[in-house]
Amino acid sequence: MSEARGAAVVIIGGGVTGLSAGWWLARAGVDVLVLERGIVGWEASGRNGGGATHVYSPFGLEEQRLWPQMDELLGYPTEHQPFRIGVALTETQLALARRWAEIGELRGFRWESLDRRQIKELVPIVGDDVVGGTYLHFGGHANPQRTVQAYAWALQDHGGRILQHTTVTGLTVRGGRVSAIETSRGTFSADTVVIAAGPQTGIFADMLGVSLPLAPARVEMIATEPIPPMRIGGVAGNGLYGRQTLRGNLVYGGGPHEWINVPDMAAPDHPNTPLVRNLARRLAELFPGAAHVRVIRSWGGVVENTPDGLPVIDRLADPSNVVIATMSSVGFGLSPASGRGISELVLHGKCLFADLGALSLARFAHTPPDWRERAGWMAADAPLVNVR
Amino acid sequence: MTLDARSLTGKAPRPERHVPLIVVGAGPAGVAAALEAARAGVEVMLVDEHPVDNDMMAMDVPLYFGGRMDPAVRNRALMLERVVESNPALAAAADAGVDVQLGTYVWAAFIPGPTSRELDTPLLGLADDRRSWLVGWDRLIVAAGARDVVLGFPGWERAGVMGAGAAAALLTRYRALAARRMVVLGSGDLGLRTAALALEHGVEIAAIVEVGERVRGDDKLAHELADRGVPVLTSHTVRGVRERTGEVESLVLTAVDAGAKPVAGRERAIACDTVCLAVGLAPSVELLALTGARLRFSSPLGGWVPEVDASLRTSVPGVYAAGDCAGVHDGMLADADLAREQGRVAGLAAAASLGAATASATLEAAPATGEVHGHWQTWLRSLVNAGGMEVNICQCEEVTRRELVETRPPRYLVWSSPQMSARNLDTLLRDGPVNQDQLKRLTRAGMGPCQSRRCREQVGLLLAQATGGPIERIPLPTFRPPIRPLPLNVLAPADESAAIREDWVSWFGIPTQFSPHWDGAPIDEPTAHTRLIVSDE
């Protein structure tokens, strides 16, 4: 191989968070190398709801500031569309939608209540059972598949490198620093290592003797054939997240997740389960006017969660040249901002535009090793073998 | 132990019923498998999607019907009658106690695995035009047949351009092919047999077109057709379709040289209402792929086929494959007994594994036949030479050949940038081997409602040409459920459990996950549950 055997910053994981961090670093002129086990954005980064409305997060304001500029900054299309509509079929759903809106208001964003008539005007496929809803003059959505590729290409345009089909197998620590990254394609060196490997981030933390409590889980989505585009595609409700894509497909997920074991992620497969039927039912309830529309695909994705469901974005004390980044299952929408934050952690030792105190690893210093059992976040026992 | 009420734990759906053996597909292989197992005393369900609903046919699912259905296909009762009449073995199966379910789609197989442990039994997703349901099984024999291989040319979106598999189904099973004058593309056994079958049913064959220098199929068949006055045009390819009000009116052909390039001034138009693509068939492996069965590439068998042993067991315990879906070639077309024998072997093996006392049977290795993809590539090369790169390769999403190999974003984005213009298949290849799924995401070729039935093979073939590599190096694009496009209100379960409904959340239901946590935010008090798992102090 002719490539240089290392970089100033090596990022483990070509998901949306690692790619964004790599892009921000490359933009800043840093020599960056992303190592990806498969193809960039192939896992949950490229298969998710595409929502970009996370104002409750310390990255929230920067997320809102950056998304409208992303196409231009990257030079490639993300299909970002502004605004969100929340549709409620029950009073409980309405309270949830309003709470989301009110958090936005706390951060200075505008929103409105919608009555049934207003919702039907904006979203003609809803039914007469709509209780009410919200119109957010903030937030939005984008196309995950297109966006991950945009980050990857833009990173390369700024001189960064990506090695796909390269599995990291080990980390060598010497003198309190990670001195070498062993991979299926040889050993690489780095001044700083960013671990942004999604559900596998905990495995790499383990290699460094650092305990990062993470539980992987499988979640599912369905996609329909396209229908005529509505004025606002970012419509969700009835316990579903998702959007109408610019092409017109209805793409929605939600409902029960299945906790899985860390070793079972070695050979990733993403099965769907009969849950796709329940998703179809929820979607038909949300949009009775589209109940005849055909489901043409479904996906299963594996995501990770920390015990409190919040990200861990932190620079380790020991080894001293490692940044850990897991978004705790909510990574796509925040990626413009989280990547920037991570790049600043690498370059300046801290995030300059937001206080990431709530995302520190230290909050889990006393988390018991059996936390998954305590939480009930365990995978079921091995399935029965099919053959009697 | 605590239970996460928001998780799938304990919520696996109850199947409507459980059957020891399900056979999918009531062609020669499937019926033979079902009969054999039933005679051995096994309770068998035999499922077949025919008669397929008109709306499904209009989407070219499961075969490339090309809008050439007679309006009679809307009469479901009549079609059911004809499907039964045309397949006398069905009656024999029913007499032997097989539970025969016609007009029933199989849209998914769900098998418990390392990351789907909540399922307690393997399931099959079934549906008709009104509802869907789940059936549990111990053994599954997939005899799903083969699909039409489709190659496009200017105007192939018009009604009247169809596939040989669809033509055969409409002629024999449905007796509802609305064609009067047909041009058949391809002179292999598939093309010759399709022409003969159409003639037999009163369809005029205007010509058989072959890109190669000589007729590829069986000599005897070719002579019989010649005797009946069917012209064969060798060293010809398609320039395009002339249409009137969206329907095929004539087909424009051009002679090609040995390099599959058009010969100037050698064009001719043939009046016809139907163009039947009979270049090849591909095994229908979508259901097998969903079971997780290992697939391998074998050009003589039509492409990606399941790995099977002499008892036709796939790599997945309890799952068998028989008939065309396990490999399709001219021998299978010529003699349905080959498929029957495969079905018999699979049926016996499945019955024996369920404890029935049966004679064991194994299969001799299939007769070796020639590879087919080289010929398909010649066809495609000639069509590209004659029709150009501005032809849609994906009808549903309107993606042209050029847009595919230049990895253009879809036109509706109206996007251009210097960076995007600098990206193409070559730049993508610098980052890794070509992957059809990745190109799907970037260009949308293969993302439409026909579920890539009309473009899967031609996209693979064109990518192989564009990258100069062999077709088998291009990984098989994935299949996802539902493998038949089903309406939301058909897929939706009528019997949704209370547990699913009551504990439904859009995302995990971790109390602190979406609470404000920016610096100085009014952070919600963590619940006792969160405190417990975050810290045991």
Image (cartoon, coloured by chain):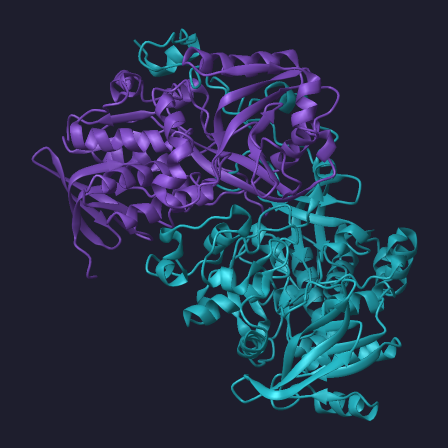
Chain colours: A purple, B cyan
Q: Position of residue B130 (x, y in %)?
A: 80, 40
Residue A119 in the figure: left or right of residue B458: right
Locate residue A319: give its quadrant. Answer: top left
Front residue (pair A323, B144): A323
Locate residue B144: give its quadrant. Answer: bottom right
Q: Position of residue B420 (x, y in %)?
A: 39, 52
Residue B488 in view in this figure: yes
Whether A229 is drawn above or below B346: the answer is above
Q: Position of residue A251 (x, y in %)?
A: 58, 37
- Name the residue: 29% across, 52% down: A163
Number of residue marks? 0
Whether A58 is drawn above or below B184: the answer is above
- Name the residue: 45% across, 69% down: B466
Front residue (pair B86, B406): B406
Front residue (pair B180, A374): B180
Quadrant showing the N terminus of chain A: bottom left
- Name the residue: 86% across, 56% down: B94
Q: Looking at this rendering, what residue extends furthest in the left direction? A: A175
Residue B227 in the figure: left or right of residue B382: right
Residue B48 in view in this figure: no
Residue A179 in the figure: left or right of residue B309: left
